Image: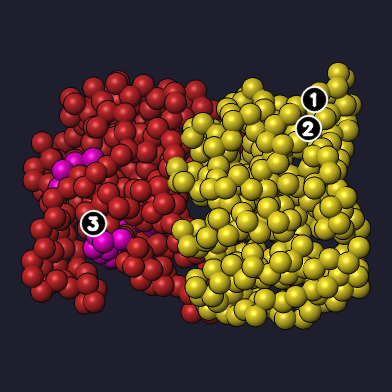
Chain colours: A yellow, B red
Amino acid sequence: MKKHIYIFSPSSAIRDKAVVRRGVQRLKALGHEVELDEAVFATHMRFAGDDETRLAAIHRAAASGADVALITRGGYGLTRLLPGIRYKTVAKAIDKGMKFVGLSDFTAFQCAVMAKTGSVTWAGPALGEDFGIEGEPDDIMQACFEDLVSGQGEGAGWQLPASEAQDKPLHIKGQLWGGNLAIITSLAGTEWLPRVKGGILFLEDVHEHPYRVERMLTQLLYAGVLKDQKAIILGHFTNYKPVPHDKGYRLKTVVDWLRTQVKAPVFTNLPFGHVPTKVALPVGAKVNLEVEGRDAFVLWGHSH
Amino acid sequence: MKKHIYIFSPSSAIRDKAVVRRGVQRLKALGHEVELDEAVFATHMRFAGDDETRLAAIHRAAASGADVALITRGGYGLTRLLPGIRYKTVAKAIDKGMKFVGLSDFTAFQCAVMAKTGSVTWAGPALGEDFGIEGEPDDIMQACFEDLVSGQGEGAGWQLPASEAQDKPLHIKGQLWGGNLAIITSLAGTEWLPRVKGGILFLEDVHEHPYRVERMLTQLLYAGVLKDQKAIILGHFTNYKPVPHDKGYRLKTVVDWLRTQVKAPVFTNLPFGHVPTKVALPVGAKVNLEVEGRDAFVLWGHSH
């Protein structure tokens, strides 16, 4: 089904335009109409244009009438913009059916939209890193994105490690939220972090050593965020450098420690993060988390 | 004046005992009695012993009756311990004259003690990196430490960049607090961050790219911390790696941006951080910040 996809750059500057062009070609090849925001290639130091330019891009995306507003890339730049975003305008676009899609730095936008309006956005791919790569984009990522774009998606499933298998089926109902751990943590103590009671929190990160992951989880723990969650789901934590000083301290150490700190179950292996194989997840939606044996599903029914 | 200095390891493990031994010899050569905590060389993965061991070390330091309790090093490990620290015991030791001294990860202890008890601790050197180096320890660091140990210190002064010179003398009175930016930020939204109204906040960091420094300052801004300060003083931000993507974005960009976000003056060049030349500063004390021309002073009168 042909959909209108609007591409914008709210965070870091695009350095290689070919990546974006390839991504656009791929989306077009899937049958979609793709519209590039006028500032998609803007640059201002690290940023895809100065703050005004990037804010205007977000608001043009909201005003575009597109079915999907997809970021070119993450990086850094959204936290700076949070006070300047017109949340009602964004919520109105979402009410009319627009799906904002992205990840990483985009988590700041997603959390702020959820905190200010309760509207649902989508944790999913970015145009560049997911569709613009030289090789073939990941099958599962593409299938999940197509489900999302078409509104046919009903959930996402994955396999848990054997150690997390549930003999008795587990059903947990809650509001799904999450994304990049560093970004979520960077919103603690601010008005931009949604207060989610009985939530299902998913987290991923990149370039963060396990001790930093632990320090961030500690912040969410002490801030009272973790105790309010019915389940915590960890995606991928990638591209950090173990050091000799670790002496056996690793990501698993942190996950084991986390389990001693919260009553909620902690599941891992969610196909999400800075990895090619990623599902699309509705941030802010009521979902069912179903676990049986090693099979886990996050289910939200039809997305419209 | 001979003082009793208690050395303990509340954070990362010591990997090179020679560094600690050298530091101890130097303090002894200055005429002090130096006592090593029994767990000073303990190791548990990255840590100087498991959580119980490090908590016990803190409490032994508090019970030691020493004049100064000095950390061996920072690293990582204190945020994990915050709920287990007996703050009244620590405050009682401080009331009797004990000075807890350290920096970096130790900022977590200092903030928590201040938040829970209002007691003053000292941002200053660590035994290993400052006194245990192979070459001669920094003169200014040693002089400031000696002033602190002897209780003769009345303040710390430094020279501002020409661009920050004040034609008219500036007098600002407030509660001094601060330390490592990453640690302070990691306490936002938690009970361990002191709520300081009319404060004078000093900050330093290491291994943090300017965009991360900016993201952390943004968090303190959005959390309402920065607007409550009468002055912000930046120490050294060191050992980060600029990348080609920065395209002119640098630490100065962040400082310039910070000045557009807060009404309080932002001063730089404070000799504090992960650098050899560092002053000692009372965290939680009422101080006077005096600036005239390029000369800046933080004055606290006699420290006892």
Span colored in magenta: B262-287
Q: Nearer the viewer, residue A75 or B297?
A: A75
Q: Estimate the spatial distance between the alpha carbons at disc 1 and disc 3, rounded to whole Å.
A: 52 Å
Q: Are marks 2 and 3 in contact (CB under 8 Å)?
A: no
The residue lying at 36 percent from left, 56 percent from top is B204
Q: Secondary structure at mark 1?
A: strand
Q: Chain of mark 2?
A: A
Specify the amino acid type for callout 3. Ala
Residue A186 included in the magenta stretch of the image: no
Q: Is residue B287 among what the camera can see?
A: yes
Label 2 crowd (10 A; few <14 / some 14-19 / many >=20): many
The disc label shown at residue B231, or none: 3
Q: Nearer the viewer, residue A104 or B102?
A: A104
Side of A117 relative to B227 (left or right): right
> Would you identify the image quadrant in which residue A235 lies?
top right
Q: Which residue is mark 2?
A: A288
Label 1 crowd (10 A; few <14 / some 14-19 / many >=20): few
Specify the amino acid type for callout 1. His
The disc label shown at residue A171, or none: 1
Side of A243 relative to B241 (left or right): right
Q: Chain of mark 1?
A: A
The residue lying at 84 percent from left, 52 percent from top is A151
Q: Is residue A245 among what the camera can see?
A: no
Side of A85 relative to B72 (left or right): right
Q: Estimate the spatial distance between the alpha carbons at disc 2 and disc 1, rounded to whole Å.
A: 7 Å
Q: Nearer the viewer, residue B71 or A269?
A: A269
Q: Mostly what secondary structure, the magenta segment?
A: loop
Q: Nearer the viewer, mark 2 or mark 3?
A: 2
